Image (spheres, helix red, strand yellow):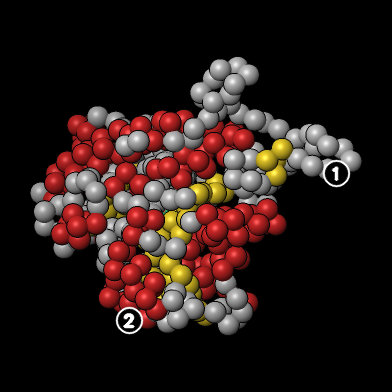
Amino acid sequence: MKFSTRLLHGHGFFEEETGTPIPPIYQVAMFEQPDRRTGETRLTDRGTELKYSREENPTVRALERALAAIEDSEDALAFSSGMSAISTLYMALLKSGARIVVPIEAYGTTIQLAADLSKFDVEAVKVWPSAEAFIEAIKPGDIAILETVTNPTLKVVDVREVAKACREVGATLIVDNTFASPVVYRPQADEASYTVESLTKYIGGHNDVVGGCVASKRERVAELWEWRRKLGTIMHPFEAFLVLRGLKTLEVRFERQSQTALEIAEYLSEHPRVEEVLYPGLSSSPYKPLADKLFARRLYGGVVSFKVKGGRSEALKVLSKVKVITASPSLGGTESLLTYPIISAAKMIPEEDRLKLGITDGLLRLSVGLEDPEDLKEDISNALA
Ligand SMILES: Cc1ncc(COP(=O)(O)O)c(C=O)c1O
């Protein structure tokens, strides 16, 4: 099946008893053990026991099959948030004395969590978010984590090259693909060890659900499954239902959001009150050639970052003046959101790193939703005025 079809049918669910192909919400905590003497249970399609919803739940499992199908991966696990996916992976992979290679630019909590692992004698090695810097830093046995498109300055990293180097060196690579989404890039196709997505963003897509996932090879997922069971970080059935529903429109949303984002990026590039626009789809962006090499389609996502002239006070004025757009730090959903990264996602990045990365006082990050592009441009234009 092609990608668009997998979005709808990748879960492979069909309930014989009722004849529905739509996975319902199994809002249940437990399942019967049919053989009371041995405690034998029913099994899921991957051979795990179906007995308790902290371990397995049919709605969550249907979502996982759909996620595996769209990530070009053998299997997938759904988690209660993007951070619970990342922290469960850390618990499964890290040993005392290990090194974790993290970019200086990434979602702030990812960087913070890696740094806080020092209390378990795990060393966080910080590198510039580029393939060259990762390749230079990784050593055998390392765990490396990176974002395909960085948050918030939208640098594109050549994941293919890093994945190749990790395999050669004997390091494990976790790719957080949240900003690119599987519509344009699937790290499993380049043999990254693990793909992480915050389902809260494009995949859920409606600003109404928090979730995460990890996609990987069957044996790796089986090991991680045990850690999810022990940590209790599984997604809940209602959330899984919402994400399954969001998945159906992922591609059409991402296409429309990417088109509107490019239109807004071009508009802002000409705006006299804007110093610089960061968007990998702009023909002037130094990251466009890499995005065109890596991404399956000429779509660059719905997030546009831009620097307002006049620094912090002017940027915060713009944030306070938008009306159609909501001031909020999330992204990838149906409603447009605007955030000031220095006080949200990039708050945990030390000032010295922030300045090197271009996360300046005037920087705002816009996540474009599904509103009419003209209304969005007018809203931003009024706020800038
Ligand atoms: C790139 C990226 N990864 C991971 C996360 C964490 O996801 P969640 O908020 O679902 O825990 C975020 C959250 O903003 C993010 O932007």
Furthest toward the right, the residue is: 37
Say which amino acid is labelled 2.
Glu
Q: Are marks 2 and 1 in contact (CB under 8 Å)?
A: no
Picture residue at 59% right of the left edge, 56% below the top: 222
Q: Is mark 1 within 8 Å of ligand 1?
A: no
Q: How many marks?
A: 2
2 or 1: mark nearer the eye? 1
Q: Which mark is residue 136?
A: 2
Judged from the image, the secondary structure of the residue bearing numbered disc 1 is loop
Q: Is residue 132 above or below residue 258?
A: below
Q: Position of residue 282 (x, y in %)?
A: 15, 52
Picture residue at 52% right of the left edge, 54% below the top: 218
Query: Is residue 24 or residue 102 the one in the foreground?
Result: 24
Say which amino acid is labelled 1.
Thr
Judged from the image, the secondary structure of the residue bearing numbered disc 2 is helix
Q: Residue under circle 1? A: 38
- Specify whether 71 is left or right of 232: left
Query: Is residue 18 or residue 205 the one in the foreground?
Result: 18
Picture residue at 19% right of the left edge, 46% below the top: 298
Residue 365 visible to the viewer:
yes
Q: Position of residue 300 (x, y in %)?
A: 24, 48
- Specify whether 88 is left or right of 173: right
Between the residue at mark 2 and the residue at mark 1, the CA separation in whole angstroms equals 54 Å
Task: Examine the image and state in which quarter residue 167 appears.
Answer: bottom left
Residue 236 visible to the viewer:
no
> Label 1 crowding class (10 Å Cα cut-off): few <14, some 14-19, many 20+?
few
User: First in sequence: mark 2 or mark 1?
Assistant: 1
- Specify whether 279 is left or right of 186: left
Query: Is residue 167 or residue 294 the one in the foreground?
Result: 167
